[in-house]
Amino acid sequence: MTIIAGIVMLGILVFVHELGHYCVARLAGVKILKFSLGFGPKLFSKTWGETEYLICAIPLGGYVQMLGEGGGELGEDAELTAAERERSFADKSVARRLAIVAAGPVMNLLLPFLILPVSYMVGVHLPAYIEQPACVGYVAPGSEADAAGFQAGDCLQDLNGDPLETWTAANKALVNNAGDKLRFTLLRQGKSVDVFLPADNGSLEGLQALGLLPVQPAIIGSLMPDMPAAEAGLQQGDRILQVAGEPIRSWYDLKHLIQKAEGQPVELLIARGQKEMTLRLQPRIHESGVWLIGIGPQQQTVSKRFGPVAAFREGADRAIELIDLTLVFIQKLFTGNVSAKNIGGPITVVQVAGQAVQTDLSAVLSVLAFISIQLGILNLLPIPILDGGHILFYFFELVFRKPLSIRAREILQQIGLALLIMLMVLAFYNDLARLFWSS
């Protein structure tokens, strides 16, 4: 299901991208020879009118092949009839060629403005804490936040002068300040306290990456069958008060105390309704070497549904926010303030898509919008072989009233291809590193 979901999402985004090129080319009077989803061997081919439509075996892109597209003034089709010349891509004005090339990434950037409002009308389901004040429920031992002196109960007030009203605002501020020295102003037991973290060019995963976690009550939301917790009689909705006599303030205390028992039987004091009871269970070792009892937390979420006008406004605001965050990430990446380890590839896309499919339609649309924005902006980068590189060539032609020489374009495209291959290799390496070595 995860793999299929990823392939379908990529297919949708590639289709939207190529549809942009296709539609504007048709409007400009260019003859379309092929419209392909995917590369490599053909899986399906059908000719309607003068265009061949294909689905190919490698679902990592697509292309629209136009008459007269390629090198030279008239492209690879050097000998064209007068009628064909009128429908050649190379014979169109610079402005029309530029519009055709830009249409693909522009369609990817416009798609979120169409689908995000739908997600808000359907109803979005969000973790309850993200719109709550950014108060810390747990500080991971040994984390950056722990070393800096954060404490459970701290409420974040601002980061380098940016107000932090909610967890969402705090995570966004972290992206904007990536690579900078961080000064958090906290409210601790009614007093204002400043906490500093050194400049970090690492993760963009938000407060959790620093070791700061929200308030998460130790309430059981799920039980794995045939595991110690279920066998001992624990139930969904039980609140864990103590483990081996030590009080539980947060869900995150549980892992530490279960591991501390080192496989010895432990007693859990729980509250069920108005009653308290003690249950004894035997943790079970996992193949990873971690002791487990087989429980999951109760997920506290809020659901919001909007009318058409409000949904359009919220969806547009979210799309603009995602575009802004992506641009900030790229800027921080090129300045070295963000690690290249944050770059993800197709495997990451498939994983994220699979997780979204297991939730609801709103999550699917949100992920689709997020990936579409990244695809659109990536294709607009001025790298030869990408759409942005061709746009750069056409701007050169507009300014200097002549096209870049064929030799110069060939050299730049070879450089662009090398850069793209290196980027793909890095993305795949990061994907595999997360998949096999992060655990």
Image (cartoon, rainbow, N blue to C red):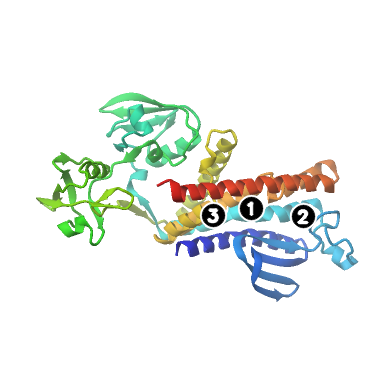
The answer for how far apart the CA atoms under marks 3 and 1 are is 21 Å
Instruction: Please identify, in this view, whether the residue under mark 3 or under mark 1 is nearer the observer.
Output: 3
Q: Nearer the viewer, residue 264 or 369?
A: 264
Instruction: Please identify, in this view, whether the residue under mark 3 or under mark 2 is nearer the observer.
Output: 3
Pointers 3 and 2 in contact (CB under 8 A)? no
| Residue 422 point in image, percent of width and height | 63, 46
- Residue 346 is labelled as 3
| Position of 263 relative to 356 (above/below) | above
Q: Amino acid at mark 3?
A: Pro
Pointers 1 and 2 in contact (CB under 8 A)? no
Pointers 3 and 1 in contact (CB under 8 A)? no
> First in sequence: mark 1 or mark 2?
2
Instruction: Tell me: 422 left or right of 275.
Output: right
Q: Amino acid at mark 1?
A: Val
Q: Amino acid at mark 2?
A: Arg
Q: Which residue is depicted at the point 45% across and 65% down?
A: 1
Rate crowding at label 1 as few (under 14), some (14 to 19) or many (20 or more) other CA atoms within 10 Å.
Answer: many
Which element is circle 1 on?
Answer: helix
Q: Nearer the viewer, residue 314 or 183?
A: 183
The answer for how far apart the CA atoms under marks 1 and 2 are is 15 Å
Rate crowding at label 3 as few (under 14), some (14 to 19) or many (20 or more) other CA atoms within 10 Å.
Answer: some
Q: Nearer the viewer, residue 93 or 79?
A: 79
